[in-house]
Image (tube, rainbow, N blue to C red):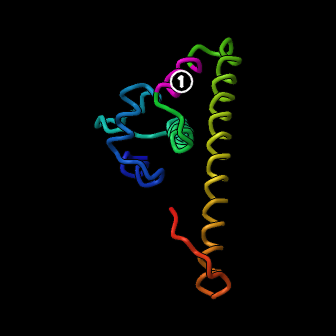
């Protein structure tokens, strides 16, 4: 696949993909006879993983550490697992915060519905 096709498939800019390759987040992408990137299945799997982890909030530094461990082979399985467990814990904390925020929003929306429907008269504007 060309970089344009991969960019569209993963909804990443071509610059972002080049950057990920440059800093080593994805392995060097094979090139065709003209020197253009020719993304193979392995390259696409790495991009998909990186995109998923980035959208979950994993930092570039943590991803680089993961990739470094991956390149070192099986002896780093525990290190990789620990890194992913740490990221999971971070995500779970974010999820709790999002749930609290949603609860607050639902409460506020309920109050507005009650006021609009005339079921509530004692309203003081609050943030």
Q: Nearer the viewer, residue 70 or 32?
A: 70
Which residue corresponds to mark 1?
A: 67
Q: Is residue 12 magenta?
A: no
Residue in the picture at 50% in, 36% down: 43
Residue 66 falls in which quadrant of the image? top right
- 79 left or right, relative to 44: right
Which residue is depicted at the point 61% across and 55% down? Answer: 101
Residue at 30% across / 34% down in the picture? 35
Residue 4 percent coordinates (x, y) = 36, 50
Query: Farthest left residue?
Result: 34
- The residue lying furthest to the bottom in this view is 118
Judging depth in this view, the residue of 116 and 12 nearest the camera is: 116
Q: Give the main secondary structure of the magenta stretch.
A: helix
Q: Please say if 52 is above or below 68.
A: below
- Give the magenta-colored segment's residue range: 61-70
Q: Residues within 10 Å of mark 1 (few under 14, many from 20)?
A: some
Q: Give the camera-side residue of 54 and 27.
A: 54
x 41%, y 33%: residue = 20
């Amino acid at each position: 696949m060309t970089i344009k096709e991969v960019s569209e498939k993963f909804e990443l800019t071509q610059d972002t993909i080049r950057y990920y390759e440059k800093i080593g987040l994805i392995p060097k992408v094979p090139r065709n006879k003209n020197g253009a990137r020719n993304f193979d299945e392995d390259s696409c799997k790495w991009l998909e993983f990186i995109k998923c982890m980035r959208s979950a909030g994993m930092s570039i530094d943590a991803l680089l550490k993961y990739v470094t461990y991956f390149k070192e082979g099986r002896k780093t399985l525990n290190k990789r697992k620990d890194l992913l467990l740490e990221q999971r814990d971070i995500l779970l904390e974010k999820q709790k915060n999002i749930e609290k925020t949603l609860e607050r929003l639902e409460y506020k929306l309920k109050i507005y519905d009650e006021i609009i429907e005339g079921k509530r008269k004692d309203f003081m504007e609050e943030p």
